[in-house]
Amino acid sequence: MNTQILQFNINNIDICAREIAQGGVVAFPTETVYGLGADALNKFAVKKIYEAKGRPSDNPLICHVSNRTQIEKFAYITPMAEKIIDKFMPGPITVVLKKKGVPDVVTGGLDTVGIRMPDHKCALALIEACGVPLCAPSANTSTKPSPTTALHVYNDLNGKIAYILDGGECGVGVESTIIDCVNGALLRPGGIPKEKIEELVGKLNDPPKSDVPLCPGMKYKHYSPAASVILAQYGKNMQDRIKKAYDSLCGKKAILSRLGGYENRNVLFVGNTVEEYAHNIFALFRKLDEQNYDYIICEGVPEFGVGAALINRLVKASGGNII
Ligand code: AMP
Ligand code: MG
């Protein structure tokens, strides 16, 4: 299969919607990262997503909708979800609700479904043209950093899908915040800060224990480049810890830094703000992989706002290698 990158216009939306109607998968931009979408009601199409990504099929997929009526049609809206939908949708947030008629292959056999309405005109136009929810994980090969440009998607999935809809660079750069609205819990920090959600709905519960493998030495790696990632905790002596780790490593190495202060060591600037750091992180991981780096040492950031989402991704990318 020849993978074509199509610019965002009405004609190309139509081509992609037809591909999806025929049971195909299409990559499309959202405000968080690029998604790999299929008709959520067509289980054969959904299986193709898992095949293209090389992702285990017990991992539930988020359903992307373009309006509120679609949420009502496919899920039981709780009072907490009602508030979140009103205030934050469209936006980088996913609500997990009891499902209505969504195939098991989409939800990993769970009786709940994750639903989100992306704040991106290209994504909304595509979903609207399809007339069905599009279930979509990030459009990368499983375990690789999430894609934030059409070219990232192409580099991972060329030959595996027919079309990539190109809507430019994603704004947020990290995935959506996931809220379990049945149990009132934060499942994943993301584009909308936990603090803002708690202002609206009150204190959220912590995710189930198995979802927070924060201890050093954990096995689970995700969002990760081929290079080994080392995360420096934000706080006292961070720069000193980073310099010491850098100097002890043999191989091609870089420090991802917002704050500087590393003398003549090899530093890549991630942006001035935590938001810029989050926006750039996955693209930087990919760039360093192209250049065959062995080690990437990442500065930590304060763990609130989008900083919490960024730290969550960096901990996972590091596989627990935290200094
Ligand atoms: P993404 O990595 O952005 O593709 O989002 C997929 C993630 O959303 C999954 O790995 C789960 O953590 C979460 N998710 C999606 N649907 C559900 C659900 N029904 N229940 C719990 N978590 C879900
Ligand atoms: Mg992903």
Image: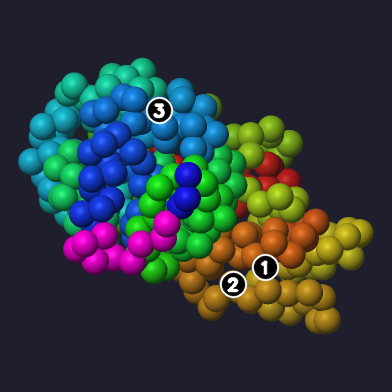
34 above or below 256?
above
Q: Where is residue 208 in the image (x, y as percent from the top left)?
A: 45, 28
Q: Magenta residues? A: 4-12
- In this figure, which residue is indicated by the disc labeled 1? 256
- Tell me whether the residue at label 2 lies in contact with that at label 3, contact meaning CB atoms closer than 8 angstroms: no
- Percent coordinates x, y for residue 54 in the rendering: 54, 34
Q: Residue at x 56, y 63 (%)?
A: 283
Residue 113 position in % (x across, y down):
28, 29
Residue at image mark 2: 270
Q: Do the residues labelled 2 and 1 touch (CB within 8 Å)?
A: yes
- Residue bearing mark 3: 47
Decide if residue 40 is in sight here.
yes
Q: What secondary structure is marked by label 3?
A: helix
Way the structure is coloured: rainbow
Residue 86 among magenta residues = no
- Tag 1: Cα neighbours inside 10 Å, few (<14), some, or many (≥20)? many
Who comes first in sequence, dot 3 or dot 1? 3
The residue positioned 82% from the left and 68% from the top of the image is 243
Q: How far apart are marks 2 and 3 (CA)?
A: 36 Å
Considering depth in this image, is 147 or 178 the residue closer to the camera? 147
**Left/right of residue 95 with respect to residue 231 in the rendered view:** left
- Identity, as a three-letter code, of the amino acid under mark 3: Lys
Q: Which amino acid does label 1 sit on?
A: Leu
Q: How crowded is mark 2: few (under 14 residues within 10 Å), some or many (20 or more)?
A: many
Q: Is residue 51 above or below residue 226?
A: above
Residue 11 is one of the magenta-drawn residues: yes
Precedes in sequence: disc 2 or disc 3: 3
